[in-house]
Image (tube, rainbow, N blue to C red):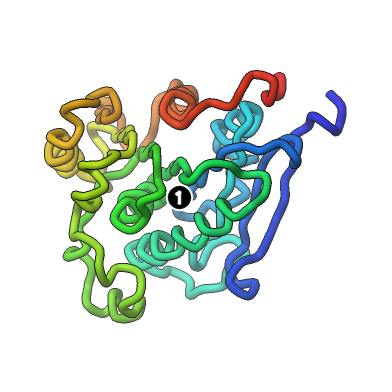
Amino acid sequence: MTDEYSLRAEKVFLEDGSIPVLLLHGEPKTPRKAVLVLHGRSHSKEYIRTGYRYGAALARRGYLVASFDSYAHGERPGPEGASWHEIALRTAGEVPRIVDYLLAREDVFGDGIALIGGSMGGVGAYLSLLLEPRIRAAVIYMSSPVKLGQFSAEIMGRLGDRAFAKAEDYLPPAELLEAAPPAILMQIGGQDPGFSVASARQYAGMLAPFYAKCPEKLRLQVDEGLGHETTPEMPAQIVEWIETFFSSPPADRRIAE
């Protein structure tokens, strides 16, 4: 495989250098759609090329795959033992700025992105759906939704009133769901000790009426018997969901596996 058709990793810094972003893509001059990955706790942006198998798979299929270091992770300083609640909130609050950057790139086309998040990154993904109307498809795994009201006043106070001032408590804005609901795939282990299957079922049930005309765009996958883990098939399922509901690029933009 020549360098021209190899995957390329590119790192940029946003917000005056405070947010490092890793981009994984093929030929940089070819327009593509963007997929943003929110990493889990103790992970970093580097996992889109070293740990999350769907990262390289999507990049080889013609997508630009991006991830950024969450607060107190990777190249971003922060206190040891920072609460994952605060990290997830901070991550979600920064997603709109990352989306602005991605959609402004010359090699990205379209007016929206796809979002993937697992574990702590999954909580950040659920919260991002409250804030970012440009998410067209999402895969959230090893996680369950949370309500803004569950976060302490102390944590919310440290974040200020910027990101979540106008957000709903639990579901994406009704006007978005009524007009163009994003395609959402949710996965959780039936025995996950850290996340709630009941909350995931409740969330899916509350969303279902908005998907009456497009039920194929909403799926909750509860893997009974699994703890905080995914199935071996999950990376392929993630790729399939993104390709199905977020305009798979033409075959001539793909890179052979």
Which image quadrant is residue 88 in? bottom left
Q: How many marks?
A: 1
Quadrant of the image for the N terminus?
top right
Dot 1 surroundings within 10 Å: few (below 14), some, or many (20 or more)? many
What residue sits right under mark 1 in the picture?
A: 40
Nearer the observer, 128 or 108: 108
Secondary structure under badge 1? loop
Please say if 183 is above or below 131: above
Residue 214 x/y as whole percent: 24, 26
Quadrant of the image for the C terminus?
top right
Q: Going 55% across and 37% down the picture, which residue do you hit?
A: 52
Please say if 109 is above or below 211: below
Please say if 4 is above or below 123: above
Nearer the observer, 190 or 62: 62
Q: Going 69% across and 20% down the picture, which residue do you hit?
A: 252
Instruction: Give the side of residue 227 with respect to residue 62, left or right.
Output: left
Residue 251 x/y as whole percent: 64, 19
Residue 47 x/y as whole percent: 59, 45
Q: Going 39% across and 31% down the picture, which residue do you hit?
A: 230
Residue 94 x/y as whole percent: 45, 64
Mark 1: amino acid: Gly
Q: Going 65% across and 48% down the picture, which residue do you hit?
A: 23
Instruction: Give the side of residue 212 with respect to residue 14, left or right.
Output: left
